[in-house]
Image: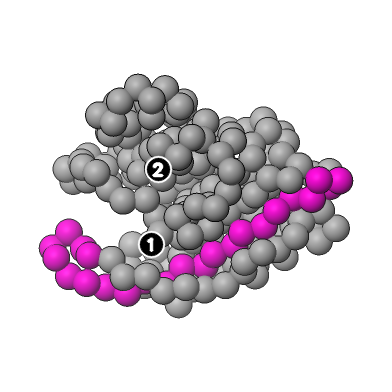
Amino acid sequence: MSEEGTGVSEEFGKEFWEERYRGHAAAGARRPNPQLITEAGGLPPGTALDAGCGEGADAVWLASRGWRVTAVDIAATALRRAREHAQALGDAVASRIEWIEADLTTWAPAAGHFDLVSTHYVHPAAARDALFRRLAASVAPGGTLLVVGHHPSAPQAHVSHAAAREVHFTAEEIAAGLDPERWDIAVAEARTRSVTTRDGREIVLRDAVLRTRRRLDGHV
């Protein structure tokens, strides 16, 4: 994601992401993020926001489990592939997902609306705190906010030094921005996961994982 008016933001603007997705073939049946499966697998289905959905693996997984999903991304190429992936699974899945092309640094979700707000590896650059405040505000009372990001100890080869501070964060840093009288922190930790690169190499990545529940009597 990008933030207008900063040099860092241009690195993660619409052109960056379009070029990134156009530069490689569709991933096919890409798997959902394992942190989403772990943290949301036991939640009862309701309304979900997938903020920065990419090619749609998380949104499709949620829809296949009965969620009504609003999936947002800045890249039209990613959204086209996501729609195709969902449609290939049939109307029971595809009809549960609304795809929205938007920049999360300016797009504002409906306040207090979603039972689950999930964002994975979003690149908000200088707008990180403002973005997460908007996402938190969109969680319904009793709902869940799930933030997964690149931990500071994770490889930073894909970003510049200027952007690394905003792209990489700890779960505790994000949790510190939430009102403790309105949120119950369930998980705030770093986790490792193994992935296979496009050239077949196995590498270990480190994620920051925050799962928190908005209290029923809280007001965001």
Left or right of 115 in this view: 121: left
Question: Residue shown at 50%/52% (left/top)?
Answer: 41
Q: Which of 58 and 104 is in front in this view?
A: 58
The numbered dot on residue 61 is 2
Residue 191 lies within the magenta run: no
For disc 1, the neighbor class at 10 Å (few under 14, some 14 to 19, many from 20) is: some
Give the position of the C terminus as an image quadrant: top right
Left or right side of 187 for 103: left
Q: Is residue 127 visible?
A: no
Residue 146 in percent (x, y) is at: 58, 54
Instruction: Determine the CA span between mark 2 and mark 1.
Output: 28 Å
Residue drawn 14% across the image and 65% down it: 200
Q: Evaluate whether residue 88 shows in this view.
A: yes
Classify 184 as above or below 135: below
Label 2 Cα crowd, 10 Å radius (few <14 / some 14-19 / many 20+): many
| Residue 216 image position (x, y, % from top left) | 81, 45
Q: Give the range drawn in magenta.
A: 196-218
In the rendered structure, does residue 206 fall within the stretch colored magenta?
Answer: yes
Total count of labels? 2
Residue type at mark 2 is Trp
Residue carrying label 1: 159
**Could you tell me residue 69's position as x and y percent?**
50, 33
Seen at 62% across and 69% down, the residue is: 188
Element marked by disc 2: helix
Between residue 194 and residue 14, name the one nearer to us. 194
Which residue is painted at 39% across and 55% down in the image?
33
Amino acid type, label 1: Val
| Left or right relative to 71: residue 133 | right
Instruction: Say which element carries label 1.
Output: loop
